[in-house]
């Protein structure tokens, strides 16, 4: 029977805590193998208690960490077995012990794999040297924690999964337009020359504008912090926009479609500045808020066209003109209410 007891004083000051040890060996028996207890007979090697609990308590006794630490580590015992044979020439018992443990970062989602420790130890002992096994188990269990502690202190700042914070940096520059893409620029509003597609003569609409927005970004790790850059684009596509009978009134209606996209992106940026992002959830949250804004854009555009009857209802068109102007100035109250958001 082997023992694994807590130590009396911590060995490591850490910025993580070990909160869970999971035995994933898939074995139903408690024995890790058999060794000789007489010259010709073997006996199973077992631990005094559940092995995962013993490892957890020993590891926890070996580390000390600040109260504010947020890195929770899960340890998985992948392998632990022992095997022996008698060397008839030397009269010694030759053994081998295999140990493998994996370390994971616990998150709000699935655990994230970090690093694996593995070792194969060969030894020789006399019949009376059965305590050799106890020494080896203790030594290499402790070595696995030492290995992980060294790794995380050396590589932690360069390992994205171990980042502590997320910083958003947003870019929304005024971009030059081209024949293929017109970017939103309040100083240069749209003109009919920007509607270059062939009109759909079967459509009841006098004009159609194709507008949208996109976000490009990249994330880099700097000193343990994720710097997420987001770059916004608000644009219309001339080769997918057309007009049958151009006039100033109709042009105003189409311009307002473009303004709505600008407002939606402004609202998106405002949401992002108040979001609580963590390294394990920021990508999912960014995707979620992007698609929410995309659906919001479609809903506002649909409400605008429906209530204005594509510009035919001049009274409501005038109201929407005012609401959209308010929205461009940062007051979205009437626009949100009119769209049923």
Image: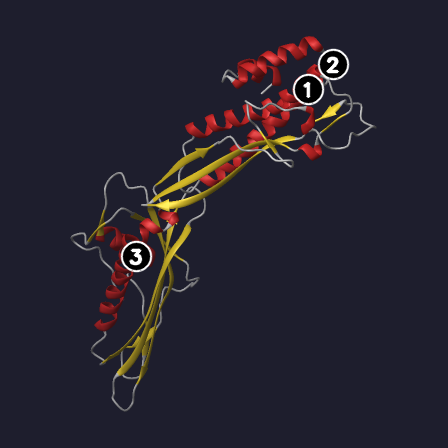
Answer few, some or many: residues within 10 Å of disc 1's Cα (few below 14, many 20 plus, some between 14 and 19). Answer: some
Is 304 displayed left or right of 87 in the figure? Answer: right
| Crowd tier of the residue under label 3, counting other residues whose Cα lies within 10 Å: few below 14, some 14–19, many 20 or above | few
Q: Which mark is residue 48?
A: none
Q: CA distance from mark 2 to mark 3?
A: 68 Å
Quarter of the image with the N terminus in it: bottom left
- Contact (CB < 8 A) between labels 2 and 3? no
Q: Quadrant of the C terminus?
A: top right
Tell whether label 1 touches label 2 (CB within 8 Å). Answer: no
Q: Which residue is mark 2?
A: 312
Furthest-right residue in view?
A: 202
- Up the image or down, 324 lies above or below 291; here it is above
Query: Which comes sooner in the sequence, label 1 or label 3?
Result: 3
Residue 106 in percent (x, y) is at 38, 47
Q: Looking at this view, name the residue that lies furthest to the top.
A: 315
- Residue 320 sits in quarter: top right
Above or below — where is 82 with respect to 276? below
The front one of 37 and 186 is: 186
Q: Is residue 146 left or right of residue 307?
A: left
Q: Residue furthest bottom?
A: 89
Instruction: Decide: is 273 above or below 221.
Output: above
Q: Nearer the viewer, residue 101 or 95?
A: 101
Q: Which residue is mark 3?
A: 151
- Mark 3 element type: helix
Residue for badge 1:
251
Residue 286 placement (x, y as % from top left):
49, 36
Q: Secondary structure at mark 1?
A: helix
How much space separates mark 2 and mark 1, taking CA atoms?
A: 13 Å
Q: Nearer the viewer, residue 115 or 84?
A: 115
**Residue at the location (49% across, 36% down)?**
231
């Amino acid at each position: 029977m082997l023992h694994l007891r807590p130590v009396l004083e911590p060995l490591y000051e850490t910025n993580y805590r070990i909160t869970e040890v999971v035995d994933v060996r898939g074995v139903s028996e408690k024995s890790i193998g058999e060794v000789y207890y007489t010259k010709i007979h073997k006996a199973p090697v077992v631990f005094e208690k559940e092995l995962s609990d013993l490892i957890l308590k020993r590891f926890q006794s070996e580390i000390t960490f600040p109260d504010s630490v947020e890195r929770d580590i899960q340890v998985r015992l992948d392998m632990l077995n022992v095997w022996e044979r008698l060397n008839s020439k030397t009269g010694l018992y030759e053994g081998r012990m295999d140990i493998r443990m994996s370390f994971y970062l616990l998150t709000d989602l699935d655990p994230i794999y970090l690093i694996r420790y593995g070792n194969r130890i060969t030894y020789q002992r006399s019949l009376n040297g059965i305590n050799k096994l106890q020494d080896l188990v203790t030594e290499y269990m402790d070595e696995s924690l030492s290995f992980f502690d060294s790794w995380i202190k050396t590589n932690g700042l360069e390992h994205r999964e171990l980042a502590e914070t997320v910083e958003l940096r947003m870019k929304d520059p005024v971009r030059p337009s081209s024949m293929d893409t017109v970017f939103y620029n309040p100083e240069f509003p749209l003109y009919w020359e920007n509607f270059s597609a062939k009109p759909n003569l079967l459509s009841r609409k006098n004009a159609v504008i194709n507008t949208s927005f996109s976000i490009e970004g990249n994330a880099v790790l700097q000193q343990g912090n994720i710097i997420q850059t987001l770059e916004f684009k608000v644009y219309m596509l001339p080769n997918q926009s057309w007009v049958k009978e151009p006039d100033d009134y109709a042009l105003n209606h189409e311009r307002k479609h473009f303004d709505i996209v600008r407002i939606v992106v402004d609202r998106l940026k405002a949401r992002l500045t108040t979001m609580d992002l963590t390294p394990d959830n920021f990508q999912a949250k960014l995707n979620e808020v992007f698609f929410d804004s995309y659906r919001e854009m479609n809903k506002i555009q649909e409400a605008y066209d429906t209530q204005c009857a594509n510009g035919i209802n001049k009274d409501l068109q005038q109201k929407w003109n005012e609401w959209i102007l308010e929205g461009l100035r940062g007051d979205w109250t009437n626009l949100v209410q009119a769209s049923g958001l």
